[in-house]
Image (tube, rainbow, N blue to C red):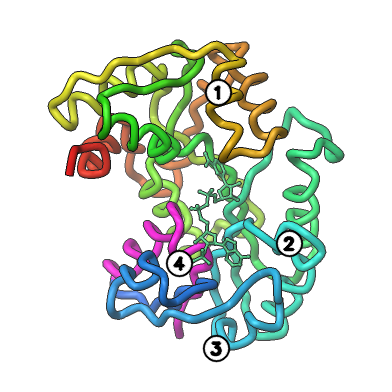
Amino acid sequence: MPILVTGATGTVGGALVRHLVHDGHEVRALTRDPSSPAARALPPSVEVVDGDFDDPPSLVPALRGVTRMHLVAMGGVLGPAGAEVIALAEEAGVRRLVHLGHDDFSRDDDDPLETSHRSLRRVIEGSTLEWTHLFPGEFAANTWEWAASIRSSGVVRAPFPDWNSSLVHEADVAAVAAAALLGDGHAGRVYMPTGPVAIRRTDAVRAIGAAIGREIAFVPLTPDEARAEWAPTLPPIVIDWFLEMGRDPDNNAWVSPDVETVTGHPGRPFPTWAHDHAADFRLR
Ligand SMILES: NC(=O)c1ccc[n+]([C@@H]2O[C@H](COP(=O)([O-])OP(=O)(O)OC[C@H]3O[C@@H](n4cnc5c(N)ncnc54)[C@H](OP(=O)(O)O)[C@@H]3O)[C@@H](O)[C@H]2O)c1
């Protein structure tokens, strides 16, 4: 019986597919575009199935014969289609669901950054499924944002050089997801996987430099300069959120024990992530 992984072409979903395949499990991967380079790069044993959360009935073939699934909170599942997707999963016979999303507990339900995630959370908790929520800390993979400028000019242009964040390796989030999909005792639990230690932006840049054997300069941006830099790729609400968070260098430095508690292994520190992804930052 296949395990359905949605978000399989993404950061955590991709790591989860590799984890499950490595351990000998049958995996079905959902994507909106099976011909994309990311979908074609999935391991050959993976069954790749077309489907889109924005069109819930398109998920029916992917859900057929599935009892366990990983749901990434993206696209339409974060809107009114979320309830339809969960109902379709129940009808198809899904019993266990691991939900990868986001929850900033310090913010209210009607906060624009939280509201769609909270409504999906409520739909899942109101379902008959054995659910587990994963609300990780900041992904180490967010530093891919720096890859192009590191490759082209050996420079990172970013605000808040002292900002401290417990960057988590996607393989550790995936290992927690795999444990919750495969093992018992995770139903009704909320896990918040983080890296084992927080790292400041300048030290993260240094770690990438060490991994690729190249000195990288950190060029600090003012908040206004950062806003202009991010404007082409990020919605204003997300930019405001990042700039607000940056005012307190240690507000994202919290470390959770969940990776080690759930998997039995300590989380990987950022230098390990930089080493694992060095090729993405090297001149090609
Ligand atoms: N980045 C962070 O620091 C961070 C921290 C905590 C929590 N999170 C949460 O982690 C989750 C993943 O975030 P991410 O930005 O890292 O995503 P991502 O890895 O870039 O993955 C996006 C995935 O979602 C799939 N997808 C997007 N829209 C879809 C749709 N309409 N129907 C079906 N599949 C769809 C894509 O598949 P195809 O393109 O192949 O269809 C892709 O595999 C989010 O819920 C986010 O809030 C992120």
Mark 4 or mark 3, whichever is nearer to me:
3
Secondary structure type for disc 3:
loop
Q: Position of residue 217 (x, y in %)?
A: 29, 16
Q: Earlier in the sequence, mark 2 or mark 1?
A: 2
Residue 155 is covered by the magenta coloring: no
- Amino acid at circle 2: Ile
Q: Nearer the viewer, residue 192 or 76?
A: 76
Is 269 left, or right, of 16 in this rendering?
A: left
Q: Position of residue 126 (x, y in %)?
A: 80, 63
Mark 1 or mark 4, whichever is nearer to me:
1
Secondary structure type for disc 2:
helix
Q: Residues within 10 Å of mark 4 (few under 14, many from 20)?
A: few
Mark 3 or mark 1, whichever is nearer to me:
1
Q: Position of residue 18 (x, y in %)?
A: 32, 63
Residue at x 37%, y 57% (from the top left corner): 15
Residues under labels 4 and 3: Cα distance?
16 Å
**Which residue in the structure is indicated by mark 1?**
252
Are the residues flagged by discs 3 and 1 in contact, CB closer than 8 Å?
Answer: no
- Amino acid at circle 3: Gly
Residues under labels 3 and 2: Cα distance?
20 Å
Q: Range of the magenta residues? A: 1-23
Residue at x 49%, y 65% (from the top left corner): 181
Residues under labels 1 and 4: Cα distance?
30 Å
Residues under labels 2 and 4: Cα distance?
19 Å
**Which residue in the structure is indicated by mark 4?**
182
Query: Which image quadrant is residue 188 in?
Result: bottom right
**Which residue in the structure is indicated by mark 2?**
124
**Which residue in the structure is indicated by mark 3?**
65
Q: Residues within 10 Å of mark 3 (few under 14, many from 20)?
A: some
The CB of the residue at mark 3 lies under 8 Å from ligand 1 = no
